[in-house]
Image: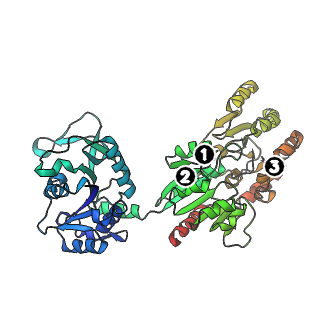
Amino acid sequence: MKKRCIVIPAIKKNAVIPDQLVKKLAGITLIERAINTARACEAGSDIIVLTDSEEIGLICERLGVRHVRDRELRFRSLDIVAEMRVLLRALAGEYENCVILRASCPLLTWVDIEDAWRKYLESGADGLVTVKNVRQRVWNIGDGRNVLNALEDGEKEYLVESRALIILKLANFADNAEKRPQRIIPYFLDERAIEIQNYQDWWICEHLLMRRHVVFVVAGYPAIGMGHVYRALMLAHEISNHKITFVCTSQSELAVESVASRDYRVVRQGEDPLAQTVLAQRPDLVVNDFLNTSVEYMQALGDIPKVNFEDEGPGAKYADLVINALYGENEGSEKLLAGPDYFCLRDEFVNAARNPLRGEVKTLLITFGGTDQHDCTRRVLDIVEPICRERGIAIRIVAGPGYAHREAMEKHLAELGNPLVEFAWATNIMSRRMEGADLAICSAGRTVYELAHMRVPAIVLATHEREARHTFARARNGFAFAGIMDKIPDSRIRNLFLAMLGQERRARYWERQDRLDFGGNKARVVGLIENLLEKD
């Protein structure tokens, strides 16, 4: 007695779309797709196709699976177990269990079958049925078929059978037994529970099956900030036709929290090497955004197309495309695209009101990225606040979600007692904070591009050596680059701030920013990524 068989009902008379079982869906017929899924779990000799079609019978012979054909066969009810009782009774003498796989649910995978099988065995149940959660308000048609009556107050959650998979203990059908399975457990399919019942379902399934899997590998923690995560999320929002997964490096707890809050699937690296974690997701394309890659990591990804951002590591030469928007201009390499033409502007900035050049500074913005590990914000505030208080300049302080000094800052602001100082933490509307700002003091990350777009001249203080090499933040683009924060005395920052308050210098910087345009960059970068998917 064998442990299990897989039965695939393939009744052409019951098709909701003409010839749907032999019609190609994403390049493969429904019946072949079901057989291929089954063959990933069992040998062809243990797969039985029940059909009324001579054409389907021939397909089965050519694919090396068994079939039972009855030209008069037609299912007349939704109770597939009752409709197949004769076949189940015959199989009970050969197998202990039967897996009924429906070809009309093409999103089901062999992984689903094996997972359902494992849960079925562990439960000791007589049967398993795939189901999906449906939350609905149900109505009934009243008198004259013109009046609706609600059957339930409010919404109610229902479990609806997904006609994808049924597992049965065949002993219940042996020796003309008429008893039905006593204990049936559910298996939740949810997003893979779509059953083809009309042309719209067919279209949806075809597009879902043609999706590719894009894996973003990101890092985000206090030492490096959250810029990589924000850029990857922005690009992921634009790739709507494919499946998206985020892999976060082992130390990137902040990144995990940020990505998960956007409802993307996220995997955090554990003890395994990063490449192994990435490969386990079975990607069709990998987007690396975590600073310098190693040769070992990139080679481990093999022939999978790879796009790297801000990568100056030795592994960059193994990428299909490297985009370094924060560094120098493109050096002519087809694989290396550098400079401001590849900076991607977030959607919130597209319709934001850019700042006109005002006669004097009324509002100062201070921001040092998503983490500001060394609390540069507090240092800069203490340097410029007395000047701003004296001149009536409002100060907007914006800190990111990884800012660990929030409580200390709030306490410090309370002690200052300056009503013109405003503090915002973990804002999702940075463009609004930049609207109305006449001058900014910031780090040298991607914020400088956003400030340039919003026409806000700024004093730039790099928080580390790597940021200091982001050469966009220079006078030619409307920025006064002061150097690395730890190497600059307070007097230098104070004097530079006083100089930037002058109308002539600020106007010159504003005019340089007014010539810049990043509007079409994001579409260009997303197009480059999607082109790699099409080539693969």
Alpha carbon distance from label 2 to label 3: 46 Å
> Is residue 202 found left or right of 452 in the rendered image?
left
In the displayed structure, does residue 534 sit left or right of residue 31? right
Can residue 184 be seen here?
yes
Q: Which of pointers 3 and 1 indicates the residue nearer the eye?
A: 1
Q: Secondary structure at mark 2?
A: strand
- Numbered label attached to residue 255: 1
Q: Amino acid at mark 1?
A: Ala
* Residue at the image point whose x is 81% and y is 49% from the top: 503
The residue shown at (32%, 41%) is 123
Of the residues under marks 3 and 1, which one precedes in the sequence? 1
Asked whether disc 2 touches disc 3, contact meaning CB atoms under 8 Å apart, the reply is no
Looking at the rendering, which quadrant does residue 156 occupy? top left
Give amino acid for label 3.
Gln
Query: Which structural element holds mark 3?
Result: helix
Image quarter hosting the N terminus: bottom left
Residue placed furthest toward the front: 1
Q: Position of residue 508 (x, y in %)?
A: 80, 56
Q: Is residue 324 visible?
A: no
Amino acid residing under circle 2: Phe
Residue labelled with disc 2: 246
Tell me: residue 295, above or below residue 451: below
Q: Nearer the viewer, residue 328 or 503?
A: 328
Closest to the camera, between mark 2 and mark 3, is 2
Q: How far apart in space, not on screen, are marks 3 and 1 (Cα)?
A: 41 Å
From the image, tell me which residue sits under label 3: 503
